[in-house]
């Protein structure tokens, strides 16, 4: 029983990473109804920007804020330049554009910063948290930041005019346009926010998995699993899904011999396929009905 | 994209209609000429070029598999590297563990991949568009880890992979092993391409394309959408799996990390470059996938991905029907000019 409890706690800690990624994935899904396959690479690129600033002797928080702001601008720019012209094109065009973005960011980072593994500092330190040996202060900080972001997003979407406008633009673009909302810019804003959330996720993850161009591939897969499990239409659900995926991963690693430890990515695969088959809208998502 | 391809189709129909009787004949001539040239190349080319062209054909076959799925049935897969890998491993295990002759491993690899593709396609019935892309994305990322799985190491060779012997030319033919592999691959390629062309032209092919163009109308016409989609997924996996098997024989080596997500990206790039829904375009795609990364890497390491990305974007924005569509468009324009 104690082992189970310990593993659940450790799972929550890794789940914080996935929850961050899932949140970013859902932000873009809400805005444009597409899964951003380049989300992980965008986060990785942002993290490299922060790393470069730290290498240039900037304090951590300056680098952090600069990376988040630059990512926001970058996200908006990507939407305006790349995805705006093809927003009415078939799914395949968007998919190919995402893969193109993935390739460019991945090999661009390799070209600029090479493929050696780099360490990334953590602002929370790595001491045991509240005397618990299982969970470090960094992991606790990660969970805290994720929940904090979720809270801010909730306040933003429920409590501000801009948040309301963004929800309207996502729910019903035509009607939103008729009441004077600039739907195109709302989409761009969604991209910017997703890029910024991704940047935070990347900088929180980098101390754990180390910084290199391919660091996000597995994390993104778990992020997708979390988002699908929680429901692609619900930011809160995605965060819950991310934590759940972390717990499932840890429990499988402990209690299923061989399989759980060596085939971690396969667990994500099975989770994704199973959820999509049984309940495609996820645990907390709403059923999407389309008119034929 | 759809608008321009429709426009293209209309133009093509207009320009070809008077000469429709001659078109099939001319096409046959072109194919015959291409086969003769392909047959003569290894007699004059250096060994390394022969080896590279063999790989081009392998990639062309793999991309043909993806094209059957995406171009003709409208389903998306980011996981064809996994089927390529399964085909390659089937051949490698059969050859190195059980000493099966290489030509018998191809049907085996095809059968295994068809079964895996069919089974993976079953949930695909419920997964539309983006969700299928997501599930296959997960498959591609999980595949290297599955191939490294420790309890299976006795078969797969674990991280080290498997080495297989290069087959010798049979009947004492006066050619070396590379040339023989070239001809062997060419023969398989011709059979598989002819099969794909016939499949697309048949009643089944029309059903497959009807599902792509309008799933609801297709179902209303009595097409068993679920069955055809799953079967197409299986056939697509079969083609890519046979390509993987040939690839393993040609390279004489399989290792888990050769079948990563990046291979899927290459296939997708090839598909888009060659032309979605174009069977001859797959050959252009094969050439592209083999030679362009080499050129890019020779300029700077790690540049291949960026070049891929930029070219993908260019195609999407400038040339949405791929190289094959572009050539068709140019030919249509030229023939119209001649009429006036």
Image (cartoon, grey):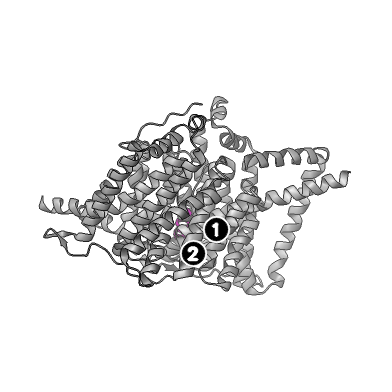
Rounded to the nearest angstrom, the CA distance separating label 2 from label 1 is 9 Å
In the rendering, at what x and y percent does residue A7 appear? 18, 53
Evaluate if marks 2 and 1 touch, with contact meaning CB atoms under 8 Å apart.
Answer: yes
Image location (x, y in percent) of residue B206? 62, 35
Residue position for label 2: A107
In this picture, is B111 found above or below A113?
above
Label 2 residue SS:
helix
Q: Which chain carries label 2?
A: A
Q: Main secondary structure of the magenta part?
A: helix
Residue A52 appears at what percent x and percent y? Answer: 40, 68
Q: What element carries label 1?
A: helix
Start-end of magenta stretch: B83-91
Q: Is residue B285 left or right of residue A62?
A: right
Is residue A195 visible from the viewing direction of this image?
A: yes
Depth check, front residue: A146 or A69: A69
**Badge 1: how crowded within 10 Å, few (<14), some, or many (20+)?**
many
Q: Mark 1 lies on which chain?
A: B
Q: Tell me what residue is drawn at x 30 percent, y 64 percent.
A: A207
Residue of label 1 = B309
Residue drawn 57% across and 62% down?
A: B307
Q: Quadrant of residue B339?
A: top right
Residue beneath the point at 27% across and 48% down? A148
């Amino acid at each position: 029983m104690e082992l189970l409890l310990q593993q659940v706690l450790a799972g929550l800690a890794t789940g914080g990473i996935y929850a961050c990624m899932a949140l970013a994935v859902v932000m873009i899904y809400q805005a444009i109804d597409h899964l951003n396959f380049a989300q992980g690479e965008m986060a990785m690129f942002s993290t490299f920007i922060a790393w470069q600033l730290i290498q240039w002797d900037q304090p951590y928080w300056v680098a952090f804020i600069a990376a988040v702001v630059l990512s926001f601008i970058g996200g908006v720019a990507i939407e305006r330049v790349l995805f705006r012209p093809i927003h009415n094109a078939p799914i395949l065009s968007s998919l190919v554009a995402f893969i193109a973005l993935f390739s460019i960011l991945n090999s661009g980072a390799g070209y600029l910063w090479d493929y050696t593994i780099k360490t990334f500092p953590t602002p929370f330190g790595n001491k045991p948290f509240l005397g618990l040996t299982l969970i470090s202060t960094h992991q606790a900080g990660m969970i805290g930041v994720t929940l904090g972001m979720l809270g801010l997003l909730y306040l933003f979407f429920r409590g501000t005019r801009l948040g309301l406008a963004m929800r309207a633009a996502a729910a019903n673009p035509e009607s939103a346009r008729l009441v004077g909302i600039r739907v195109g810019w709302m989409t761009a804003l969604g991209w910017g926010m997703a890029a910024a959330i991704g940047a935070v996720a990347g900088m929180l993850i980098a101390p754990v998995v180390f910084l290199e161009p391919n660091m996000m591939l597995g994390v993104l897969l778990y992020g997708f699993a979390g988002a699908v499990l929680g429901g692609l239409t619900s930011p809160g659900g995605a965060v819950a899904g991310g934590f759940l995926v972390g717990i499932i991963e840890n429990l499988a690693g402990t209690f299923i011999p061989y399989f759980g430890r060596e085939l971690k990515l396969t667990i994500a695969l099975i989770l994704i396929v199973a959820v999509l088959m049984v309940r495609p809208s996820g645990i907390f998502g709403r059923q999407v009905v389309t008119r034929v | 994209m759809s608008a321009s391809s429709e426009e293209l189709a209309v133009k093509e129909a207009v320009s070809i209609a008077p000469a429709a009787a001659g078109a099939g004949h001319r096409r046959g001539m072109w194919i015959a000429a291409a086969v003769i040239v392909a047959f003569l190349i290894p007699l004059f080319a250096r060994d390394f070029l022969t080896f590279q062209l063999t790989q081009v054909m392998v990639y062309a076959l793999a991309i043909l598999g993806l094209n059957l799925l995406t171009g003709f049935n409208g389903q998306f897969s980011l996981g064809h590297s996994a089927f390529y890998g399964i085909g390659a491993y089937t051949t490698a295990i059969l050859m190195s563990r059980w000493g099966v002759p290489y030509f018998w491993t191809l049907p085996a690899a095809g059968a295994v991949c068809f079964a895996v593709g069919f089974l993976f396609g079953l949930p695909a019935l419920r997964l539309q568009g983006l969700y299928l892309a997501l599930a296959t994305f997960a498959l591609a990322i999980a595949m290297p880890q599955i191939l490294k799985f420790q309890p299976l190491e006795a078969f797969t060779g674990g991280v080290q992979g498997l080495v297989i012997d290069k087959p010798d030319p049979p009947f004492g033919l006066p050619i070396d092993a590379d040339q023989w592999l070239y001809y062997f691959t060419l023969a398989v390629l011709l059979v598989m391409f002819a099969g794909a062309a016939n499949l697309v032209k048949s009643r089944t092919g029309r059903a497959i394309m009807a599902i792509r163009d309008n799933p609801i109308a297709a179902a209303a016409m009595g097409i068993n959408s679920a069955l055809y989609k799953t079967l197409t997924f299986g056939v697509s996996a079969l083609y890519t799996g046979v390509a993987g098997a040939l690839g393993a024989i040609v390279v004489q080596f399989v290792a888990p990390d050769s079948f990563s997500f990046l291979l899927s990206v290459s296939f997708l790039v090839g598909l888009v470059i060659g032309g979605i829904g174009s069977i001859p375009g797959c050959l252009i795609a094969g050439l592209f996938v083999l030679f362009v990364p080499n050129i890019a890497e020779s300029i700077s390491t790690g540049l291949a991905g960026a070049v891929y990305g930029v070219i993908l974007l260019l195609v999407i924005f400038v040339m949405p029907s791929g190289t094959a569509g572009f050539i068709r468009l140019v030919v249509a324009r030229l023939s119209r000019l001649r009429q006036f």
